[in-house]
Image (cartoon, rainbow, N blue to C red):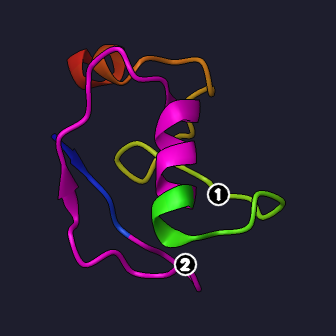
Amino acid sequence: DVLLKAVGDTPIMKQKKWTVERVRTIQGLSQFIKKFLKVEATEQLFIYVNQTFAPPPDQDVGTLYEV
């Protein structure tokens, strides 16, 4: 499961905890979030792990879970 927290002026998602396939990349997760929130494709979305670092877009979610 992935816990998503909005910061700054990011729209808040009512559901905060999501089940995500381990093979999904951070880029795929970002695209899902943008689509769900109806964010413009030109707007940037930053994803941080444990509020400390931003993983590369090609990183698998499963690999981050193991860290």
Residue in the image at 34% along x and 47% along y: 50
Asked which secondary structure carries label 1, the reply is: loop
Outermost residue toward the right? 42
Residue in the image at 52% along x and 33% along y: 28
Residue 7 counted in the magenta span: yes
Mark 1–mark 2 contact, CB under 8 Å?
A: yes
Disc number for residue 45: 1
Q: Amino acid at mark 2?
A: Thr
Alpha carbon separation for disc pair 1 and 2: 9 Å
Q: Position of residue 37 (x, y in %)?
A: 50, 70
Residue stretch in magenta: 6-34
In the image, taking residue 15 as reference, residue 50 lies left or right, namely: right
Disc number for residue 54: none
Q: Amino acid at mark 1?
A: Leu
Q: Position of residue 67 (x, y in %)?
A: 28, 19
Vertical order, 29 against 16 (above or below): above
Q: Position of residue 19 (x, y in %)?
A: 17, 40
Q: Could you say which quadrant of the image residue 21 lies in?
A: top left
Q: Could you say which quadrant of the image residue 3 lies in?
A: bottom left
Residue bearing the label numbered 2: 10
Q: Earlier in the sequence, mark 1 or mark 2?
A: 2
Q: Nearer the viewer, residue 59 or 43?
A: 43
The prevailing secondary structure element of the residues shown in magenta is loop
Q: Quadrant of the N terminus?
A: top left
In the image, taking residue 38 as reference, residue 64 lies left or right, namely: left
